[in-house]
Amino acid sequence: MVACIASLSVAFVACDKSSSSSNSNGSDGSGSGAGGEASVIEAKNVLNSGTDIANVKALIFESIPSLSMDWMAWVSNLKGYEVGTSEYKNNGFKITLSSSVPDTYLATYQTRLQNVWDLIGEESDVDVSVSEPNAKITSGVLLVAYNSAGKQIGIITQTAMADKKTYSVSRGYADRDCIIKIKFENTVTYDCSYKKGWNIIYNDISDGSTISQKPSSNMNIIWTFMDTTNF
């Protein structure tokens, strides 16, 4: 659930722009921009997946529910906009994300920041700088698994282990190049250089911070299935 919330709640994200690479478990989250590696999600050796998964869809959302809402009910019946889909086979999948996103699912950094305040239930004093105030971005992509009957049965998360830290990995779309930095209590917590199109999101699960580059050139990628049928 932590990785699920992290993927959705990242309003300002760290985007890796280094050359692409991968490990035995599929894409490690390298590359950026429309048409680059960031637009392809490839998973192998998904943990805890069983045999019921027929396909996987990549969804984005207009907004994020606050913690005061029934999160379990919301997550167990996700209704978002599909930006890619793939058949699930050989314990994995490969999704190529759409080249564009409807404006309904794009929002400015001000709106995304308010999404975060709504999520945690309070506002904090932060210093925000943005190179393009009118730039719009999406929520993080959530990977949802369905059975052969088309029923949602779970969520698939991607995590990266590097330098004794664990990162939730997702994707976010921007309608133009922009740089967003957020400083909280004199510490730069978010530092993102977006390229137009899809970008990689790294979120440090331990403290919620993000970074401006891939955590390590040698990351251990883990894909995990989380059953949502009993929520």
Image (spheres, helix red, strand yellow):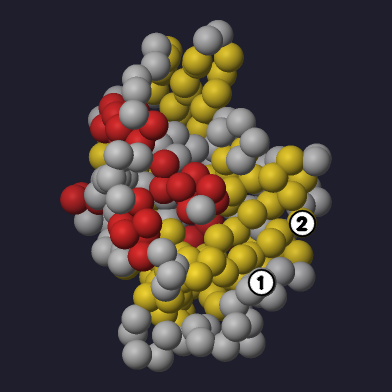
Label for residue 47? 1
Residue 96 drawn above or below residue 87: above
Residues 100 and 54: in front is: 54
Labelled pair 2, 1 in contact (Cβ < 8 Å): no
State how far apart marks 2 and 1 are (Cα).
Answer: 14 Å
**Residue positioned 35% across, 40% down in the render:** 67
Q: Which residue is mark 2?
A: 220
Q: Position of residue 128 (x, y in %)?
A: 40, 17
Tell me the quarter of the picture where residue 112 sits.
Answer: top left
Tell me the amino acid under the disc marked 2: Asn
Residues 43 and 154: in front is: 154
Q: Position of residue 56 (x, y in %)?
A: 45, 76
**Residue positioned 69% across, 62% down in the render:** 222
**Residue positioned 51% across, 32% down in the render:** 192
Circle 1 Cα neighbour tier, 10 Å, few/some/many (<14 / 14–19 / ≥20)? some
Q: Residue furthest front?
A: 230
